[in-house]
Image (cartoon, rainbow, N blue to C red):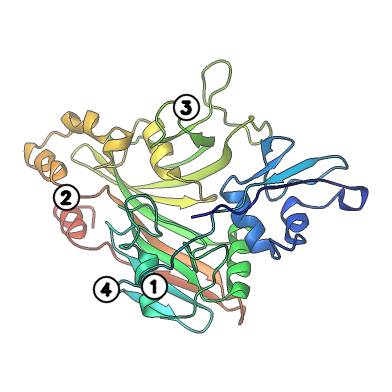
Amino acid sequence: MSKNPSRSQTVEVDGAGTRLDKWLAAWPEVSSRSRAAFLIDENRVLVNARPGKASLVLKTGDEVSVSFPEAQSSELKPLAMSLDILFEDRDLLVVDKPSGLVVHPAAGHAEDTLVNALIAHTDDLAMGFGEERPGIVHRLDKETSGLLVVAKNDSAQASLVSQFQERSIHRLYQAVCHGEIARLNGRIESWIARHPTDRKRFASVLGIDRKILRSAEAPPSAGKWAATTFKRLAIKHGMSFLELKLETGRTHQIRVHLSELGHPLIGDSLYGSDRRLKSIPSAGIREQIQHLSRFLLHARELGFTHPRTAERLMFKAEWPDPARGLLNQWGFL
């Protein structure tokens, strides 16, 4: 596997005042704003040695450097498996992803991902950069179930990426977390970055006073702005059943925000569920939680504008079993 070269370029006078994603799209090796957005979201673009944002307005003399993804030496292998596809046409498809399925190939998951299943299902997927993530414009964690939209050509991919950047995509989640959340409604804001000592986790960025930075107007040197709103649907058995809406889509966003609120997702051992297990009054429910093979987070609704027809599409997916059975038994559904 050989690496594509990195490239650096200084912004000239004619590039000043241009958004970073638009400026990068003019590079021959990038060629589109969707690919520029991909590089930026993967933290492969530095402006003056700091991670750039798509909306950053460039100035004359800014130094932009890009580290391109590795060139793949072998093709993805198709995986024959049944997919729950709710919608499909020549531009995109919407799939209800089961818990336990990784979205795209990564370390330890080269041949058993949603992408492998997608290339077995169709030859028409937007390629973006390389072959490792064809069609993927957003992701769900392995243990999260629910709705995902996949692009089947570069035009659809560019449109969907733009909608995500503009925050016009409707994404509604349901979750069960530890503890009884007192508020009926709430909003959680922070800058999220990889955890400083545990590379498997993410965390909100702290200020010099060791408190979480919650102002969107004062970006830290690292981290991406994240905003989550929630509505409490029910409280039972020392747990809260929530509806959550993402305004941004950062890695582990809901998991980080709820855990830092003191209410980690049920079953999310990485973010503290195990430490809260004793707070569940029922020994029977504690045992059920210990036997969970997932955490209880589900992408319930997904809405977006169709890239070709401009029709507003909305999809809903029910919780899958066995999680649905537990939620029924606990009185949440």
The residue labelled by disc 3 is: 196
Q: CA distance from mark 3 to mark 2?
A: 37 Å
The residue labelled by disc 1 is: 118
Corner quadrant of residue 123: bottom left
Which circle's residue, 4 or 1, is located before the other in the chain? 4
The residue labelled by disc 4 is: 81
As rendered, which of 182 and 86 lies closer to the eye? 86
Badge 1: how crowded within 10 Å, few (<14), some, or many (20+)?
Answer: many
Kind of residue sitting beneath label 4? Met
As rendered, which of 82 and 275 lies closer to the eye? 82
Residue drawn at the location 63% of the way across and 67% of the way down = 158
Q: CA distance from mark 3 to mark 1?
A: 35 Å
Kind of residue sitting beneath label 3? Pro
Question: Relative to 217, does residue 4 appear above or below in the rendering?
Answer: below
Label 1 sits on a secondary structure element that is helix
- Residue 271 location in percent, x, y? 33, 35
Q: In the rendering, which numbered label is found on residue 303?
A: none
Q: CA distance from mark 1 to mark 2?
A: 35 Å
The residue labelled by disc 2 is: 330
